[in-house]
C-alpha cells in the first residue's frame, strides 16, 4: 500500500481535550511497540468522563522523537505532542504518521479498535488494539 491509500482512511476522531492532554503528557515510549493512551471520545457533544465539551481532533496529535544531549543516532524515546491544528486534515500532518489514525469495530468483541500508523522513511507499521478485549495486531510494509 502507498501513502495515498492510507490517507484515504484517516478518521476524524474527536477526543475530550482536557482528559486527552493529561493522558498524552504522561506517555513516553516507542511508536507501535508501546500502545498510545486510551483517550475518551466526545459523544453527543460531551465527554463521558469529565462531561466537558472542548474537543481535540486526532490529526493534531503526533509523535515527537526526543534526543538526549549525547545522542548520536536513534531517539532516546518518543513523546506524544499536540500541534496547533484547529481543523481535521485528511493527510499525514507529521512525517511519522498518526498515533490516532482510525477507529473501527473489533471482530472478536464488537467494541472499538484504535489503529496507530507509524510512517518512517523505510516503510510503514500499523498497530491495532481493542479497547475492550485487548486484541492486538501489528503489521508492516515497505
Image (cartoon, helix red, strand yellow):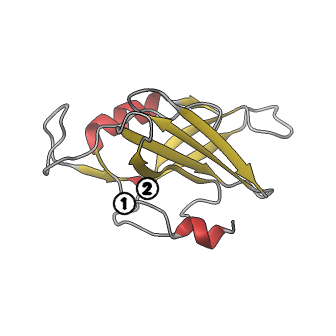
Is residue 79 or residue 97 the one in the foreground? 97
In this image, 20 relative to 28: left or right?
left
Q: Secondary structure at mark 1?
A: loop
Image-quadrant location for residue 47: top left
Is residue 129 or residue 65 the one in the foreground? 129
Q: How many marks?
A: 2
Residue shown at 57% from the left, 46% from the top: 63
Q: Is residue 75 above or below residue 82?
A: above
Q: Nearer the viewer, mark 2 or mark 1?
A: 1
- Residue at mark 2: 60
- Residue at mark 1: 12
Q: Secondary structure at mark 2?
A: helix
Is residue 11 or residue 106 the one in the foreground? 106
Residue shown at 60% from the left, 70% from the top: 5
Image-quadrant location for residue 3: bottom right
Q: x and y percent of residue 139 in the render?
A: 68, 45
Amino acid at each position: 500500500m502507498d501513502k495515498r491509500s492510507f490517507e484515504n482512511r484517516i478518521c476524524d476522531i474527536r477526543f475530550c481535550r482536557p482528559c486527552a492532554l493529561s493522558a498524552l503528557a504522561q506517555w513516553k515510549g516507542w511508536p507501535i511497540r508501546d500502545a498510545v493512551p486510551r483517550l475518551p471520545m466526545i459523544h453527543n457533544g460531551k465527554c463521558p468522563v469529565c462531561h466537558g465539551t472542548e474537543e481535540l481532533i486526532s490529526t493534531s496529535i503526533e509523535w515527537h522523537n526526543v534526543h538526549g544531549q549525547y545522542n548520536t543516532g536513534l531517539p532516546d524515546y518518543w513523546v506524544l505532542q499536540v500541534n496547533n491544528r484547529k481543523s481535521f486534515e485528511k493527510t499525514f500532518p507529521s512525517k511519522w504518521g498518526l498515533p490516532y489514525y482510525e477507529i473501527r469495530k473489533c471482530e472478536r468483541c464488537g467494541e472499538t479498535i484504535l489503529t496507530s500508523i507509524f510512517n518512517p522513511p523505510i516503510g510503514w507499521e500499523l498497530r491495532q488494539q481493542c479497547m475492550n478485549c485487548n486484541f492486538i495486531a501489528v503489521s508492516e510494509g515497505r
